[in-house]
Image (tube, grey):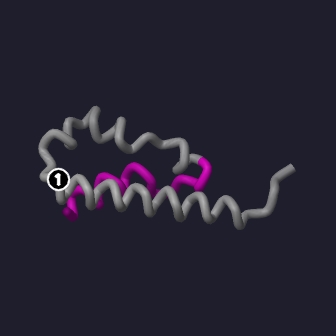
Amino acid sequence: MRGLIAILFSLYSGKPADEILKIDADEMLTRLHLTEHLTPQRSNGLSAMVRRIRADASTALEGSPAVG
C-alpha cells in the first residue's frame, strides 16, 4: 500500500485544491496499468484515498475567499 500512497502523493503533492479537483486519478492509474494488478481490496482502498483527497480539496475551496 505504501507504493500506492507514494504514487498518489506524487500526483497531488504541492498542487492547489482547484488543480487537485481537475486531476483524473483513475485515468492516470489506468495509463500506468496499475488497476489491472490490484486486488479488489487494494483497489477499493485506493479509490477511498482518492475520494478523501478530492473531498478535502473541495472543502478547502469552499472555505477559501473568492478571488477577483
- Taking the image as shown, residue 39 lies to the left or right of residue 2, namely left
Q: Main secondary structure of the magenta part?
A: helix
Residue bounds of the magenta highlight: 1-18
Q: Position of residue 62 (x, y in %)?
A: 69, 62
Q: Position of residue 55 (x, y in %)?
A: 52, 61
Q: Is residue 16 magenta?
A: yes
Q: Nearer the viewer, residue 30 or 7?
A: 30
Toward the top, the furthest residue is: 31
Please report the residue visible at 79 percent of the width from the left and 62 percent of the height from the top. 65
Q: Nearer the viewer, residue 10 or 17?
A: 17
Q: Position of residue 67 (x, y in %)?
A: 82, 53
Please report the residue visible at 59 percent of the width from the left and 54 percent of the height from the top. 16
Amino acid at pointer 1: Pro
Q: Which residue is mark 1?
A: 40
Q: Position of residue 48 (x, y in %)?
A: 35, 60
Image quarter in which the N terminus is found:
bottom left
- Taking the image as shown, residue 36 lies to the left or right of residue 45, namely left
In the rendered image of this protein, does residue 37 appear above or below residue 44?
above
Marks counted in the figure total 1
In the rendered image of this protein, does residue 42 appear above or below residue 34?
below
Q: Secondary structure at mark 1?
A: helix
- Taking the image as shown, residue 31 lies to the left or right of residue 41, namely right
- Taking the image as shown, residue 59 lies to the left or right of residue 63, namely left
Please report the residue visible at 71 percent of the width from the left and 67 percent of the height from the top. 63
Please report the residue visible at 53 percent of the width from the left and 53 percent of the height from the top. 15
